[in-house]
Image (cartoon, coloured by chain):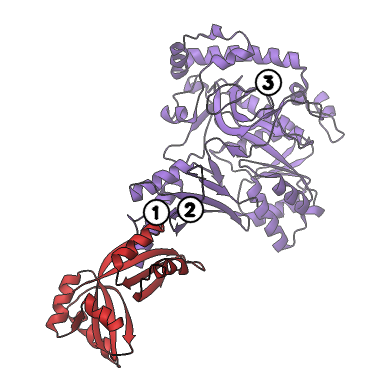
Chain colours: A purple, B red
């Protein structure tokens, strides 16, 4: 009854959003209680975490305040890979109701698990994210995130259902059909990657689909970094408001943080995901306002608790209270990562993978640079490699073979077609002796 | 019997050819002949110069990637069928030609063919057996210089 009264177009809010407005003191109390519980749970059930705690002479009792979190060991992506597939699970498989896997690019993916309660929490935070954009019961949400092992599709789906909205589970691809559904179903919100939406905009123009005249008013974009310039372009071209959503499968999937209608930073759903900003070099915690690496502790996850997970995303906490009234702290939009990882066509790529591919062919690592561009909404990846005396030949065919071998070696590892260009020595710009590895021109 | 050829890697964009040529011109090194092989993306400049060791050093110091390879020069009469005759000999002997280029000498009514063979020593044998004239380095310098 109340749910229906609150959650409508008149501007009320969904009960799930209540924690967004907790007074700060109450929020900190919830966080500490949950932090102590999750540390105890992980200590009891995850061998890797327990041994790291023991190495430091720590027990769950060592956590008496939120500040004590800084004593705890970090968890990194390699831990998930090293314990593949289920070494970090903290519950028996019979309690796991769902498995997802990340878009890992080298060999094995990263597997994440959820109990029934975990799915409920995920649905709730995702519903709160959608409510942040002003969506509610009665909205028709077209979910063009991929359904499957990727967390994007199902995460948004459950959140939209929890919110009470109508979900169109169209998944990714088939742009013409996406546009037909937007128009024919009266879709009011669309969720997908920003690059896919840019592609959709171009197709809409070709087909003469007038998006600004459609009921579409909200775009929810995530799973890859995008700029404010791109936001302005999207908003203007489609006649919508475009919002950022943040998440990563290691933590839960989408719904870790989201923008609100203020479009100034992303609210962290910190009653479930405790954020820290650290110096990526020293690992020391940094105060709010300072830029560093985002580290997240899952406060309520049961199947796969993550203690101090290093996201490698570089951001800062915005200390001021948001004008929207939420008490949840905000982080600035992610524009870069501490490890230079980039996302292209939904695939996570590390420069180190490209290095490994080049090394496999050349024997020694040549100077190289990755250049990302966007052509008609589609991301393109070029790799420039400086020619060395070892690979150079006076025969065109031999050089073409080197080029093809390098390209194939990269493609085999990351699974994406690359354009490989051989360039003259010393043409790749170096700063302090080190070449800048990734040039991202996708948002120029 | 073999000539030293220098090859340079160049990116295929305007202005790339001038710099290495200027670098050796500044040291008074004269080019006997050259050829440029190119693809859409890169080019390979092949040069024959008298002072090839000095030129190689200049290129290396200038930051270019240089490769030194042995090529074979044959002279034929500069008239129709001159090249075809030499090629027929090589073909009959099943000698693999990686690439070739040619230039003519105004003075002597001769054309010089430069061959890059997979096996230059065997190629020289075959050429000599068939009465073709393999041009020595010194002789080429005289022809051109």
Who is closer to the viewer here, A89 or A196?
A196
Q: Nearer the viewer, mark 2 or mark 3?
A: 2
Lateral position of residue A272 relative to residue A343, left or right: right
In the rendered view, tell whether residue A254 sits above or below residue A370. Answer: above
Image point (44%, 51%), residue name: A411
Q: Chain of mark 1?
A: A
Dot 2: within a 10 Å radius of its alpha carbon, few (fewer than 14), some, or many (20 or more) residues?
Answer: many
Who is closer to the viewer here, A59 or A18?
A59
Who is closer to the viewer here, B86 or A345?
B86
Q: Position of residue A27 (x, y in %)?
A: 72, 16
Distance between the alpha carbons at the discs numbered 2 and 3: 42 Å
Q: Nearer the viewer, mark 1 or mark 3?
A: 1
Q: Which residue in the protein does label 3 denote?
A: A271
Residues at discs 2 and 3 both on one chain? yes
In the rendered view, tell whether residue A196 sits above or below residue A302. Answer: below
Image point (75%, 36%), residue name: A165
Q: Say which label, 2 or 1, has the lower sequence index.
A: 2
Q: Which residue in the protein does label 2 denote?
A: A383
Tags 1 and 3 in contact by the CB under 8 Å rule? no
Q: Residue furthest left?
A: B129
Element under label 3? loop
Tags 2 and 1 in contact by the CB under 8 Å rule? yes
Lateral position of residue A294 relative to residue A49, left or right: right
How many marks can you see? 3
Distance between the alpha carbons at the discs numbered 2 and 1: 9 Å
Distance between the alpha carbons at the discs numbered 1 and 3: 47 Å
Tag of residue A406: 1
């Amino acid at each position: 009854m109340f749910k229906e009264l609150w959650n409508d177009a008149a501007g009320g809010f969904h009960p799930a959003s209540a924690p967004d407005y907790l007074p700060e003191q109450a929020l900190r109390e919830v966080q500490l209680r949950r932090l102590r519980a999750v540390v105890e749970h992980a200590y009891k059930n995850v061998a890797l975490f327990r041994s790291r705690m023991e190495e430091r002479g720590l027990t769950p009792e060592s956590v008496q305040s939120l500040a004590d979190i800084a004593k705890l060991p970090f968890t990194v992506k390699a831990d998930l890979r090293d314990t593949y597939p289920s070494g970090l699970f903290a519950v028996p498989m019979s309690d796991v109701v769902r498995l997802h896997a990340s878009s890992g690019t080298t060999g094995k993916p990263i597997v994440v698990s959820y109990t029934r309660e975990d799915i409920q929490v995920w649905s709730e935070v995702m519903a709160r994210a959608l409510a942040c954009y002003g969506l509610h019961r009665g909205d028709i949400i077209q979910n063009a995130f991929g359904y499957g092992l990727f967390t994007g599709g199902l995460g948004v789906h459950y959140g939209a259902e929890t919110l009470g909205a109508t979900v169109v589970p169209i998944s990714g691809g088939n742009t013409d059909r996406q546009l037909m559904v937007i128009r024919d179903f009266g879709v009011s919100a669309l969720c997908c990657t920003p690059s896919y939406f840019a592609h959709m905009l171009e197709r809409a123009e070709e087909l003469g689909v007038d998006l600004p005249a459609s009921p579409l008013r909200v775009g929810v974009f995530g799973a890859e970094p995008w700029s404010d310039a791109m936001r302005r372009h999207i908003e203007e071209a489609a006649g919508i408001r475009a919002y950022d959503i943040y998440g990563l499968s290691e933590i839960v999937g989408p719904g870790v943080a989201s923008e609100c209608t203020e479009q100034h930073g992303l609210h962290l759903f910190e009653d479930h995901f405790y954020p820290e900003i650290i110096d990526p070099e020293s690992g020391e915690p940094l105060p709010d306002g300072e830029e560093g690496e985002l580290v997240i502790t899952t406060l309520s996850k049961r199947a796969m608790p993550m203690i101090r997970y290093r996201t490698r995303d570089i951001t800062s906490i915005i200390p001021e209270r948001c004008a929207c009234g939420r008490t949840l702290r905000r982080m600035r939009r992610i524009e870069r990562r501490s490890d230079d990882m980039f996302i292209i066509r939904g695939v996570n790529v590390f420069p180190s993978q490209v290095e490994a591919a080049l090394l496999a062919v050349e024997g020694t690592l040549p100077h190289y640079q990755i250049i990302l561009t966007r052509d008609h909404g589609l991301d393109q990846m070029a790799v420039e490699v400086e020619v060395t005396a070892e690979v150079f030949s006076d025969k065109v065919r031999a050089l073409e073979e080197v080029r093809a071998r390098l390209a194939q070696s990269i493609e085999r590892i990351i699974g994406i077609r690359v354009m490989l260009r051989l360039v003259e020595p010393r043409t790749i710009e170096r700063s302090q002796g080190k070449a800048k590895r990734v040039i991202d021109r996708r948002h120029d | 019997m073999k000539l030293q050829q220098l090859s340079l890697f160049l990116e295929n964009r305007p202005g790339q050819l001038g710099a290495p040529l200027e670098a050796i011109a500044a040291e008074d090194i004269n080019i006997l002949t050259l050829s440029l092989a190119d693809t859409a993306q890169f080019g390979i400049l092949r040069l024959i110069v008298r002072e090839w060791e000095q030129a190689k050093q200049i290129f290396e110091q200038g930051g270019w990637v240089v490769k030194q390879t042995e090529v074979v020069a044959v002279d034929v009469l500069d008239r129709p069928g001159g090249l075809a005759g030499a090629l027929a000999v090589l073909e009959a002997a099943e000698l693999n030609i990686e690439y070739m280029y040619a230039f003519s000498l105004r003075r002597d009514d001769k054309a010089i063919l430069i061959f890059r063979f997979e096996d230059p020593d065997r190629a020289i044998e075959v050429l000599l057996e068939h009465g073709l004239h393999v041009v020595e380095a010194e002789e080429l310098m005289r022809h051109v210089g």
